[in-house]
Amino acid sequence: MGRRSGGLIGIWAEQQRVAQRQREGQQQAVLRQQREAERQQRAYERDVSRMQREQRAAYRRHRDADALRRTREIDDRVAVLEGLLAAGCRAPAFRMESLRRAEEVEPFAPGALAQPVPVPDQRHYSGRDGRARFERDWYAAQAAEARRLESLAAYRREYDAWAARRIDEIREYNRGVAGTGEALARGDVGTVVDYFSAVLFASGGWPDGFPREVSAAYDRGGRGFVLDWDLPGYEVVPETKGVKYLPSTDQEKEVARPVTQRRALYRRVLAQSVLLAVRELFAADRFGALESVALNGYVGGVDPATGLASRVCVASVVVGRQDFDRLNLELVAAVDCLTGALAGRLSSKPEERVAVAPFRTPDQVGGDVVVQGDGEEPDLLSMDPIAFEGLVAELFRARGLQAVTTRRSNDGGVDVDALDPDPISGGSIVVQVKRYRNTVPPSAVRDLFGTVQGAGANKGVLVTTSKFGPGSYAFAEGKPLTLISGNELVDLLRRHGLRGRLGAPGAAPAPSPPSGDFNLLGMVWRGSVALDVCALVCEGGRVLGDEWFVFYNNPSTPDGSVAAVTASPGDRAAVRVGFDALPARADRLVLVAAVDPEADPDADLRGFTEAGIRLRDASGGELERLDVSDGRPGETALVLGSFRRRAGGDWDFVVGGKGYAGGLGELVGDFGVEVG
């Protein structure tokens, strides 16, 4: 039987054993902590690795999807070109009846006048003076009801008079349409030319970008319509077959369309265009006006021999109605049909502007040749000022407004008087037209506002062939002013069937991105506030000029060194910067943010938190995150920071933080942008 040691030696031994167990426990605890830390580190590294893989995979998916989207866009354009004739044949033919207007007017809508004035209820009147108050309110209600009935009757009389005038106008218009049909049946030369030219212009079978210019004459004796019709140029066929993303170089590669394939498709497009135009003419003739059509197709461009603009006939055909009616256009091979069945002519190399001889031209018919479309698009920059004002007035009329140009003297600064007849949102509009080449100064916008106030107009519109700077937009914000730049004007003209361009055909395109190295500055922040992120290219604390302020109405600097671009996944806004491409005198690039007044009119920057700039390389890879100041209540614009050029040419980032309660207009004013 064992025994426990006693005495001092036994006590000492027991203490040693206890100390040993404590040391072992501590060592085990340290080891457990080390193992746990190592486990957490491995888990963190796995998470980071997984996130990096996921980010790389997401980035690649994004680039693959973008390349696929661009390829599909090209395929869709080619499909439209390939099916041009078949789609046009399936579209309904133009009918004179479509021009008729229904004899209908907007119903009588008196609004609040239709509601009787409520009669007071005596049960709601109590107290000693209840009856007196009731009688007073009852008589007041009766008087108000009498005034309502009187106003309603007057409004009804005005409506009936307006409706009668409107019905008379519609009937007069419809009589004119009926008269047009009778003139076509008689073979009236002017009516035939105008009507069938309008048929080609009104057709929905032509893709966007196809020219619609015609000169025509009518042979009344032979009932032959002879016309020169503009065809699209070689550039209508995409030069690219598709786009591929190459992960190894992180670049997109455009796959060229084989030259033989592009040339063959272009010839098919030309043949289809000729056949479709002839089809539109015959299909719209329900009056027996056309027995034959002679069509010559022209393409415009620059003659390489002279360097001058010229038109070349690349297709010609003369076809009778009976021969054309026997064709099944939806199934024909367009080139074979044009050159074989119809014995027409088609250039063997239209892309090289190899011409064919036209069978018959409008000037051979005799009589007047009517030109629709005025040949080449007029250059808005060189138009006669009065003609330019007339074109702007025509644009307003095409949008459903009443518009006339003013006299040249005593017009009070108004070039076009316009009236929007809408009873709710309409009213009088004063229009000023500025045919400028340089940026319109803010003083012109301030003058327009003064004119609007002086004339008692509802709205002012300033139309220019140039553009507006940020000061002009800042002054116009919140006022009844609309600014239409040159590019916007050209777009509006085309959308409403009018014509105009800025500068000579083939003018230099907008600046492209820098070809060298560049960076992407991606903005991130928490909060739901909608912001505009802008950039100013400065020398010291002053912007180089209005055109060096990149914002929503000026998305790029003149040289393309700074531009607003689509944000990468995870970013909420982005700016592309080629630091080496910035002008030599520029020593800083300032980034600012401002509340979007249209999206969040009552918001401030209190919701702008945890903000930063992700500095990315050209491939989108994140190089560094630059933290910026949070927004503060009451402020609506904020200087995020600036990249500053150092003596050695390097760029450093300096955090900003100055806020403004007056929005973007107040902020950019500190950098020398003129704001009204």
Image: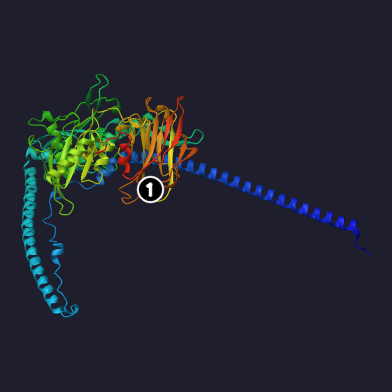
- Along the viewing direction, whichever of 411 and 543 lies nearer the viewer: 543
Q: Residue at x 26, y 42 (%)?
A: 329
Colouring scheme applied when the structure was drawn: rainbow
> Can you say which quadrant of the picture contains the N terminus?
bottom right
Relative horizontal placement of residue 625, taking residue 560 as reference (left or right): right
Residue 348 shows in this picture: no
Give how far across and how far down residue 494 sits, in percent.
22, 39
Q: Classify 10 Å Cα crowding around label 1: few (below 14), some (14-19), many (20 and above).
A: many
Tell which residue pokes out farthest to the right in this image: 1
List x then y, in percent, for residue 518: 43, 31
Q: Nearer the viewer, residue 641 or 452?
A: 641
| Residue 418 appears in the figure | yes
Q: Most extreme residue toward the front, as rendered?
A: 8
x and y percentages locating residue 153 in the rendered image:
6, 64
Residue 395 found in image quarter: top left
Q: Which residue is at 15% across, 71% downward?
A: 118
**Pointer 1: what residue?**
605
* Image x and y of residue 12, in percent: 86, 55
Query: SS class of the residue under badge 1?
Result: helix
Q: Is residue 588 shown left or right of residue 425?
A: right
Query: What residue sits 51% from the left and 43% below the top?
Result: 55
Q: Nearer the viewer, residue 29 or 50?
A: 29
Q: Which amino acid type corresponds to the residue marked 1 in the rendered image?
A: Leu
Image: 353 above or below 222: above
Is residue 662 found left or right of 323 in the rendered image? right
Which quarter shows the C terminus?
A: top left
